Image (tube, rainbow, N blue to C red):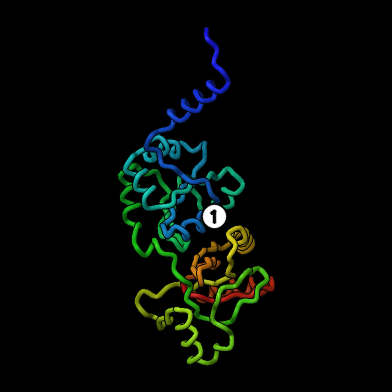
Amino acid sequence: MKKLSFTQGLLFALFFCAASQPLHAVQFVRLSLAEAKVRAAQLQRPLFVNFHANWCLPCQWMDNNTFLDPNVSDYLSLNYLAVKIDVDEVQGYADKEACGVKFLPSMLVFNASGIVVVRYEETLDAGQLLTLLQRYNTPENRVAQRPLVMNVNHISSPVQENIAPNLSADADDDPAKLDAQRRRLNLPTPPPPGSPGIRKLGVQLGVFSSYEQVIQQVQFFEKKFNKPVNISSRLYNGQTYYHLIAGPFDTPAQMQTYLNALQREGLKSLVVLM
């Protein structure tokens, strides 16, 4: 029998592995939740996160059926950032806890600002999943919203790096100065309480220009304070900055509890609308 050279054998193995991959399988990206939120904000796409485990039989069914459907695969690849998180891995377990995932499979859709817009904790076939993806692929979910400053106490936390321009503290008691700075920075005026479509409260923890730094800080704050941290990427003078925002908070009382916890750690912050 003719022997194969090492190079021929390697090429054959690579060809066999490539041929064995399903042609229309969803191409999930392997990222932590924090990394995925940053990437989705950069891409201006909603984020689809599939929490799974190798021992989960319904997860295996979806891998072998739902995620092999060409319509699902094509739609995810064109419109979403699709991420698969293994809850048996150390980081995957931490991400599961941060998102409050209790059942598998669990699929969460985040908008480009990193906020959960829907979660499904059940097995879905291709048609059901495609309907879900189409429903939440909306213009507002594809845009990472700029934080809307409500409390102008300037952040002085040591976790920050390369702070982007923001409203200064000396405008706090002067509405004219505050409006002038909002116009200069192209920030919208906060809607009055009770206005239709009012956004929820958030707490800005810092502004960073380093991708690696923002990932570290998201993991630190989520682990330390047990509250999801969202990322909003914005462009200032040609430089991308990442705003870290905890929330959303449903009530001012919930937000105040979080602010008190930050204060006990010596961390200052900024209240924003998300």
Q: What residue appears at the point 61 percent right and 46 percent down from the top-left corner?
A: 90
Q: Is residue 67 visible?
A: yes
Residue at 31% over, 43% down? 71
Residue 246: in sight, yes or no? no
| Residue at the top extreme of this rendering | 1
Q: Amino acid at mark 1?
A: Glu
Front-most of residues 209 and 176: 209
Q: How many marks?
A: 1
At mark 1, the secondary structure is: helix
Residue assigned mark 1: 35
Residue 273 position, x and y percent, is 47, 74
Image check: 36 left or right of 79?
right
Q: Residue at x 65, y 68 (%)?
A: 159
154 vs 216: above or below = below
- Give x and y (percent) for residue 55: 52, 36
Q: Residue at x 40, y 83 (%)?
A: 192
Quarter holding residue 228: bottom right
- Dot 1 alpha-carbon crowd within 10 angstroms: few under 14, some 14 to 19, many 20 or more: some
Point out residue 102 in the picture as x, y percentages from the top left corner: 50, 50
Residue 102 against residue 115 in the figure, above or below: above
Residue 126 falls left or right of residue 86 = left
Toward which corner of the image does residue 242 lie, by quadrant?
bottom right
Q: Quadrant of residue 35?
A: bottom right
Q: Position of residue 166 (x, y in %)?
A: 54, 78
Query: 62 or 235, which is in the foreground?
Result: 235
